[in-house]
Amino acid sequence: MNKKGLTLVETVVAIIIFSLVNFSILAVFVMLKASNVNMRHYLQAMHRISSKLEALKAQNYSSVVVITSAPVVIDNNGTPLDASDDTTGTYSQTVNEVQDAGHLNSYKIVGANIAWQEKSYAAVRNVSASLVTIITE
């Protein structure tokens, strides 16, 4: 730097360094937002599964059956009127009935799963959330 101020080269170098730092910070914020959306989808899927399993526990024992595939919508922002932020997944549940010969009681092991695809940048990845519970007669 001379006594009259900055030269053109010094100014351009300073602008380039400033831009690189700002773009790096911006990239971090974009990745955090994508991670936040992915986690919100996962938490909403877990909530839906938990609600479905609780509803199954309130049903008649014999009405708890296998569901191979049912569509489910995971709402991103909790805004039912805005479907542009929704992700569609598939709900499935497995039921295994177990007879306890020693006590003559039976119970069902119910596994519930929601699977969907997350879109992030240029890639699409398969994601799922699962819970298991036991329902007695």
Image: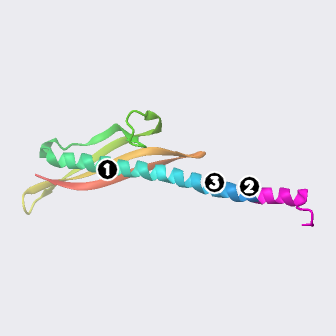
Look at the numbered disc 2 and give the secondary structure of its residue. helix
C-alpha distance separating marks 3 and 2: 10 Å
Q: Is residue 69 above or below residue 20?
A: above
Q: Position of residue 126 (x, y in %)?
A: 47, 48
Q: Residue at x 68, y 54 (%)?
A: 23
- The CA distance from mark 3 to mark 1 is 32 Å
The quadrant in which residue 98 appears is bottom left
- In-image side of 116 versus 124 (left or right): left
**Residue situated in front as seen by the camera: 75 or 46:** 75
Badge 2 amino acid: Ser
First along the sequence among labels 3 and 1: 3
CB contact under 8 Å: marks 3 and 1: no
Identity, as a three-letter code, of the amino acid under mark 3 = Leu
The image's colour scheme reads: rainbow
Which span of residues is magenta-colored? Answer: 1-17
**Which residue, given by chain and number where applicable, does mark 1 sit on?**
47
Determine the residue positioned at 74% across, 55% down.
19
* Mark 1 nearby-residue class (10 Å; few <14, some 14–19, many ≥20): few
Q: Is residue 59 magenta?
A: no
Assess disc 3: are there few (<14), some (14-19) or many (≥20) residues with their C-alpha within 10 Å of its C-alpha. Answer: few
Residue at the location (23% across, 55% down)?
Answer: 133
